[in-house]
Image (cartoon, rainbow, N blue to C red):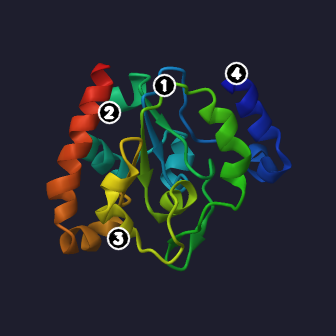
Amino acid sequence: MSDAIKQAIMADEQNKVYTERGIGPVYQVGPDVRILIIGQAPGAKVEQTGIPFNDKSGDRLREWMGVTADEFYHSGKIGNLPLDFYFPGKGKNGDLPPRKDFATKWHPKLLAEMPKVALVILVGAYAQHYYLPIKKTESMTAVIKRYETFGPKYLPIVHSSPRNNIWLRKNPWFEAEIVPKLQERVRELMMD
């Protein structure tokens, strides 16, 4: 089961530097997950705590979803599966991208552990380009605007990071139109 997968992830040569530093992979899966969040990779603060979305972006994401921290972490109905389970480091313009082929190696094994997933929230462009049949040249804004074409299983959203406050101000339709629909779908699946 997932404990064996976690041990395999930690033993993988690709993750050796993290394991040697006592850093475990950050993800959250389970057999009752109905709502799966797929984002880029944990940030530095999340890596320190080992708790997915344990930062300001997590506060905003939970607000957008209309769930409490207790529901988010302890209901068993919400899972987290980033494209990389380790903080990739800082770059010039924020965090570095997730490592290539990491998700290809580990996602299928962990997705098999979550047969009840009905909604996959794709947070940010990396997750959207990995999971959706979209052109590399299509902007994240364009993808999110046509969110209905990916439903009901997939919902692309902007990353909830405070770094995206400018994007949110320029695109008020996101919080006016998409967030209420997200909350409605999440509530429906939480009661399922």
What SS does tag 3 mark?
Answer: helix
CB of mark 1 within 8 Å of CB of mark 3?
no
Q: Which residue is mark 4?
A: 1
Q: Residue furthest right?
A: 13
Q: Marks 1/3: CA distance?
A: 29 Å
Camera-side mark, 4 or 1: 1
What SS does tag 2 mark?
Answer: helix
What SS does tag 1 mark?
Answer: loop
Q: Marks 2/4: CA distance?
A: 26 Å
- Picture layout, residue 78 above or below residue 176: above
Camera-side mark, 4 or 3: 3
Going 42% across and 28% down the picture, which residue do you hit?
34
Disc 1 or 2, which lies upstream in sequence? Answer: 2
Identify the mark at residue 69; answer none if there is no mark: 2
Label 3 amino acid? Ala
Q: Is residue 120 left or right of residue 131?
A: left
Q: Marks 1/2: CA distance?
A: 21 Å
Label 1 amino acid? Lys
Q: Residue furthest front?
A: 149
Q: Which residue is mark 1?
A: 116
CB of mark 4 within 8 Å of CB of mark 1?
no
Across and down, in percent, residue 122 comes to 44, 51
Q: Which residue is mark 3?
A: 142
Q: Marks 2/3: CA distance?
A: 30 Å
- Picture layout, residue 141 above or below residue 147: below
Q: Residues within 10 Å of mark 1 (few under 14, many from 20)?
A: some
